[in-house]
Image: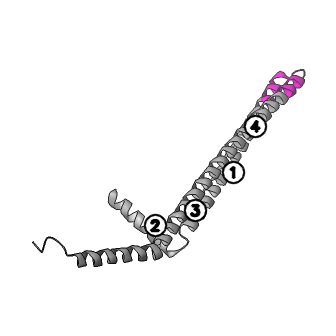
Amino acid sequence: MELVTPGIGLLFWMTLSFLFVIFILGKFAWKPVLGMIKDRENSIASALEAADKAKAEMENLQKINEDLIVKAKEEASQMVKDAIKIRDSIVDGSVAKAQEEANKKLEQARQEIQNEKNRAMSELKSEIGKFSIEIAEKILRKELANDDKQKEYIDTLLKDMNLN
């Protein structure tokens, strides 16, 4: 029966050892762990803030793109009106010649509009790509600033690979 019931001396020393371990952990381990958790919260908050900024910037760029399209349509409308005026002024001299010239102007205007639209879309895509790359670089630089975070990130990736 002595094997099942511990002695008072053993209980005393086990309790004293347990309290000593709790004291050591509280003194040296809890503060760094809580500090790491706080740092992680801050990095997640900053990443979310950066994502919100990127979203707002994307919306702004989309609005600019829509404004450019509206402006291009207005310019196209103005060019069409100009072409019609030219056609009407030349009708007196030669109807066939005026029709041919108006068609050329209209096609040229459409081509210019298409070229301007393509150029604007290309510039917009280029800017969006640059912003995306800059944001990704900043996030990765901040996330992988020290060896501990790199190791932690690698461990996370390995765990994700094992789960998949």
Secondary structure beneath dot 3 equals: helix
User: Looking at numbered disc 2 in the image, what kind of residue is underneath it?
Assistant: Tyr
Q: Main secondary structure of the magenta part?
A: helix
Quarter the N terminus occupies:
bottom left
What percent of the width, then of the height, locates residue 133? 60, 59
- What whole-number distance in Å separates the C-alpha atoms at marks 3 and 4? 37 Å
Label 3 CA crowd tier, 10 Å (few <14, some 14–19, many 20+): some
Label 2 CA crowd tier, 10 Å (few <14, some 14–19, many 20+): some
- What whole-number distance in Å separates the C-alpha atoms at marks 2 and 4? 48 Å
- What whole-number distance in Å separates the C-alpha atoms at marks 1 and 4? 15 Å
Secondary structure beneath dot 4 equals: helix
Question: Mark 2, mark 1: which one is toward the viewer?
Answer: 2
Q: Which residue is mark 2?
A: 153
Question: Mark 3, mark 4: which one is toward the viewer?
Answer: 3
Which is nearer the N-term, disc 2 or disc 1? 1
Q: Which residue is mark 1?
A: 123
Q: Which residue is mark 4?
A: 72
* Region of the chain picked out in magenta, as a range: 84-102
Q: Which mark is residue 139?
A: 3
